[in-house]
Image (cartoon, rainbow, N blue to C red):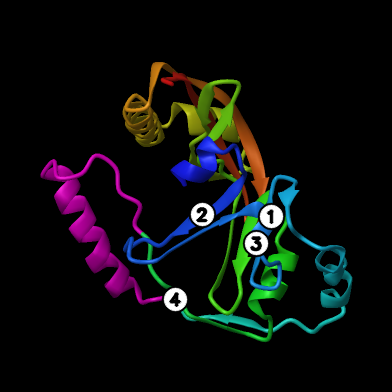
């Protein structure tokens, strides 16, 4: 990564959660048959992938999920809450695996997605997100954390989200954590609330979007 960055060569990198597997490749060498990506227009996506949605729209969709029981989720929730109260964590995202049965392939799911940032690794996974991790431009690093969820059809949804004490605490925590991380490689770190924006997904939801930015140390 350092070599490609110092050579000013765009590259793709993927690191798994356990940090025991990674993929790093210059963009010019990425095989679209193996890895597809579209990061807000920065893409190796061929035209057939863009047109594939027309074919999929005629396909009879089968999708059944198998969420874990409330008791199992409650057990995980209690562990997280207990450790937060004990001061062992400032912010935790509680997630769980949900098996699904579908007649869609991973590539089909990629084609269906309307998000601005998505990637599909052949026979492994498809991932998509509305959130930018970091963006580097003109000597500055930007991050845009998005937190908070509410049904956007709720009256005064944006005000309710902004004035909610729980959401306020979560927003302050994530912005502070990202500022701390960026301060390790940059200076003059600042954070501001940009807007309260709607996102269309399985549910129509409203989220708060922040911008954290700083000047890089070179």
Q: Nearer the viewer, mark 4 or mark 2?
A: 2
Does residue 74 appear anywhere in the picture?
Answer: yes
Going from the N terminus, do you reach mark 4 or mark 2 first? 2
Say which residue label 2 marks: 13
Marks 1 and 4, the one that precedes in the sequence: 1
- Please state which of residues 59 and 21 is positioned toward the viewer in this rendering: 21
Label 1 to label 4, Cα distance in Å?
A: 40 Å
Q: Are marks 3 and 4 in contact (CB under 8 Å)?
A: no
Q: Report if the CB atoms under discs 2 and 3 are less than 8 Å apart.
A: no
Q: Which residues are magenta?
A: 67-94
Is residue 76 rendered magenta in the image?
A: yes
Q: Give the CA separation, mark 1 to mark 3.
A: 6 Å
- Distance from Cα at disc 4 to Cα at disc 2: 31 Å
Lower position in the chain sequence, tag 2 or tag 1: 2
**Residue at image coords 53%, 44%:** 4
User: Residue at coordinates 56% horizontally, 57% vertically from top-left?
Assistant: 25
Q: CB of mark 1 within 8 Å of CB of mark 3?
A: yes
Q: Which mark is residue 28?
A: 1
x and y percentages locating residue 116 in the rendered image: 69, 48
Q: Secondary structure at mark 4?
A: loop
Numbered badge on residue 30: 3
Residue 148 is left or right of residue 135, and the answer is left
- Figure quadrant of the C terminus: top left
| Badge nearest the viewer, 2 or 3 | 3
Residue marked by disc 4? 67
């Amino acid at each position: 990564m350092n070599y490609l960055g110092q050579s000013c060569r765009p590259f793709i990198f993927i690191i798994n959660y356990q940090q025991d597997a990674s993929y790093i490749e210059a963009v010019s060498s990425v095989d679209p048959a193996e890895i597809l990506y579209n990061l807000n227009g920065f893409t190796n996506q061929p035209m057939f992938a863009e047109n594939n949605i027309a074919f999929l729209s005629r396909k009879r969709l089968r999708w059944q999920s198998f969420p874990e029981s409330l008791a199992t989720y409650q057990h995980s929730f209690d562990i997280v809450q207990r450790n937060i109260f004990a001061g062992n964590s400032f912010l935790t995202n509680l997630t769980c695996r949900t098996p699904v049965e579908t007649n869609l392939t991973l590539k089909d799911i990629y084609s269906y997605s309307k998000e601005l940032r998505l990637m599909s690794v052949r026979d492994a996974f498809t991932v998509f997100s509305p959130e930018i991790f970091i963006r580097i431009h003109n000597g500055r690093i930007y991050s845009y954390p998005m937190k908070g969820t509410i049904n956007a059809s709720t009256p005064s949804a944006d005000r309710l989200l902004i004035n909610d004490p729980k959401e306020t605490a979560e927003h302050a925590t994530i912005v502070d954590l990202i500022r701390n991380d960026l301060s390790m490689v940059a200076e003059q770190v600042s954070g501001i609330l940009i807007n309260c924006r709607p996102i269309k997904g399985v549910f129509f939801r409203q989220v708060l979007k922040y911008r954290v930015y700083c000047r890089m140390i070179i």
